[in-house]
Structure formats: C-alpha cells, structure tokens
Image (cartoon, grey):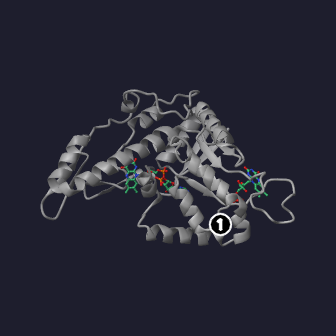
Amino acid sequence: MRAVVIGSGVGGLSAAIRLSAMGLEVLVLEKLGGPGGRASVHQAQGFTFDMGPTVITVPPFLEDLFATKPGDPRLYPDFPQEEGLAHTERYVKLVPLDPFYRLHFPDGTHFDYKDDPEHLQREIARLAPEDLEGYRRFEAHARALFQKGFLELGFTHFGSLLDLLKVAPDLSFEALDQVVELCRKHGLEGLVAVNTTLERPGLKSPLAEEAGGLSGRPLKGRSLEVLRYLAGVKDLTLVSVGGVESPMDVWERLKLGARLVQVYTGFVYGGPLFPRRTLKGLLRLMEAEGVRSLTELWVSIP
Ligand SMILES: Cc1cc2nc3c(=O)[nH]c(=O)nc-3n(C[C@H](O)[C@H](O)[C@H](O)COP(=O)(O)OP(=O)(O)OC[C@H]3O[C@@H](n4cnc5c(N)ncnc54)[C@H](O)[C@@H]3O)c2cc1C
Ligand SMILES: Cc1cc2nc3c(=O)[nH]c(=O)nc-3n(C[C@H](O)[C@H](O)[C@H](O)COP(=O)(O)O)c2cc1C
C-alpha cells in the first residue's frame, strides 16, 4: 500500500515516519525548496536563523519518533514511555541552552529565561517586582491548563459518545447524585444537562396533553435548576441546554460554570442569524462586566 503526505513540516515528517513503520510506501510532497516547514532554518551571511520554533518542549515525543521500528509504529495515544534520548542521539544531539532566552531591553537591562522556576521569579522581582504576584497567578493557571489540556485531554480519545452523558430534567436531585457518581466511576468527561422534559410546566396550550418531550422556554427554569445543582461538581465538564434563547441565557449559564451551552429550540425560532446575534450580545455582556475571556470567568468561579 502507498501513502502520500503533503507537506514536510514536523507534522508531515512524523506522519511519514509512522506510516512507513506501518509498512506503507510513503511519498512526501513539499512545495518549498526544502523540508521543515515552520521549523526550517534560513541561512544568510554566515548566520543561521530559526524560522519558527526554538524551544523543544517535550523531547520524549522526538525520542518516541526516533525509536519507531518497522512493524511497531507506536500509534498509541499515550504520553511517550521512552526514557532518555538514546534513539534521538543516533541522529541529532540535543544540547540544553542556558539560559533558554536572553531578552535585551533598550535601557541596557536584560532578562534571562532559564529552566528554573525560582530563577524566573527572581528575574521578574529584579526587573518588575509589581508583576510578580500576577506572574504567580498566571503560572498557577497555566499549570492547571497544562495538566488538564495536555496531560489529560491531550491523550483522551473523544471519539466515543459515552464520554458525555445527557440527563433528563425530570430526574430528582438524589438521582442526579447517583448519575454523577456513575460518571466518576466510569471515567466520563462530563454531563449535558438537560434533555427534553415529560412535565408540562405551566403550559396552558391545548396541545399540552400531547405525548413526547417538551423543549424550549417552558424548560428554562428546570434546566437552570439542574445546572445550579450540578455547579458544585467541579471534576466533570458541564454542558448546559434547555430553553436558551438570548445572550443573557448563555451568559447566565457560563457564569454558573457551564463550559458549553447548546441551543436547539431557540435556534429554530431565532433563525439562521441566531448564533451571530447571540455571540455579539454575549460579548457585550462580558464587556459590561469587565470579563475579557471565558477563561478569566471560569478561573474566577470558586
Ligand atoms: C515564530 C514561531 C515560533 C514557534 N516556536 C515554537 C517553539 O518554540 N516550540 C514549539 O514546539 N513550536 C513552536 N512553534 C510552532 C511550530 O513551529 C509548529 O507547530 C510546527 O513547526 C508546525 O509543523 P506542521 O508540520 O504542522 O506545519 P508546517 O511547519 O507549517 O508544515 C507544513 C508544510 O506543508 C507545506 N505545504 C503546505 N501546503 C502544501 C501543498 N499544497 N503542497 C506541498 N506542500 C505543502 C508547507 O510548505 C510546509 O513545509 C513556533 C512557530 C512559529 C511560527
Ligand atoms: C425535535 C427534537 C429532537 C431532539 N433529538 C435529540 C436527540 O436525538 N438526542 C439528544 O440528545 N437530544 C435531542 N433533543 C433534545 C435537545 O438536544 C435539547 O436537549 C432539548 O431540546 C432542550 O434544549 P432546547 O430548549 O434548546 O431545545 C431533541 C429535541 C428536539 C426538540
């Protein structure tokens, strides 16, 4: 079997190595003069310029690639198990730079960025002590994002619908507690709250007695109630749905801790411009409350 990889950036080259380890005959096509893509270098007047990356953040990924053997293509989505850099060093020698960066400022001062968190804080304290507290908060936030986004979600397969569980609004709080426990037990990522309801809350329509699930505005109150109840569950991702029809509805749910908000019925009645209108309105609400990003909002939720 043959495979064609278009582009010889690090992504294309890695894919080509893995495909050839699977036994495929691989052809790599590149439109520029040489390989490397954004990671290529430019040489001029005796100098070599990095065109893009300067920091190799996770050397074990390179080692994993260089350790790839025919018939053992290592396609598993795990954090690389390889220790050391023996395979890499058969091809290239990685030399740690100390410091990583030296930033020069026009007033003659400089800032060294090293592989040493305490040194970094000392450098900030030396040049801009008023920024130290903010840096520490940023560092804690970045650490939490790295843990979740890279170490956990980076190796999570999202192909299964079973990663999210949708709950009925008609469940009692006790039943919701049991659902949360089941999600934890089975390692689910989160909950979508809520589906349509079998109740007919406050409905006076002659159609109220019709069978089936009810969606839209009559569901709003219960959907919010369930979200408020689940808001204390910090280890599951919450997706809120049910009766959303305005930017304020979305904003309210995000402030309660929902990471995603879904709209179904509101979209039907709101028409094709509904998402645009809602997002613009949401931005205005965020501006009015001085919230610059959703990350900032979520970090502020206790
Ligand atoms: C300034 C800068 C600094 C960075 N710093 C870092 C860093 O410190 N650490 C880090 O890990 N990452 C860094 N990055 C990110 C890193 O460079 C990229 O993520 C990585 O190089 C992307 O590789 P890629 O193979 O996905 O894409 P690319 O490198 O963009 O490769 C795509 C290739 O496909 C080719 N191509 C596209 N279309 C066609 C076509 N139709 N036919 C043939 N060829 C085609 C292109 O010419 C190119 O060679 C930096 C990026 C930049 C720009
Ligand atoms: C016609 C219709 C079909 C639906 N089909 C599904 C479905 O297949 N799967 C699902 O999880 N929810 C389904 N739902 C529920 C919605 O995804 C949503 O949870 C519910 O309608 C509440 O949101 P809303 O008030 O914005 O409509 C459906 C809702 C309607 C009205």
Q: Is mark 1 within 8 Å of ligand 2?
A: yes
Q: Residue 110 in the image: x percent, y percent?
A: 16, 55
Most foreground residue, 63 or 272: 272
Res. 59 image quadrant: top left
Q: Is residue 43 left or right of residue 263?
A: left
Res. 264 image quadrant: bottom right
Q: Looking at the picture, which amino acid does disc 1 mark?
A: Glu
Most foreground residue, 55 or 300: 300
- Is residue 117 visible in the rendered image? The answer is yes
Q: Is residue 88 left or right of residue 158?
A: left
The residue that appears at 70% across and 63% down in the rendered structure is: 217
Q: Residue 165 in the image: x percent, y percent?
A: 66, 42
Q: Is residue 243 left or right of residue 92?
A: right
Q: Residue 231 in the image: x percent, y percent?
A: 54, 48
Most foreground residue, 183 or 97: 183
Q: Residue 158 in the image: x percent, y percent?
A: 61, 42
Res. 22 image quadrant: top right
The residue that appears at 84% across and 60% down in the rendered structure is: 208
- Give the quarter of the figure containing the N terminus: top right
**Neighbourhood count class around disc 1 (C-alpha, 10 Å): few under 14, some 14–19, many 20 upward:** many
The residue that appears at 60% across and 30% down in the rendered structure is: 185
For label 1, the SS is loop
* Rendered view: 275 above or below 39: below
Disc 1: which residue: 245
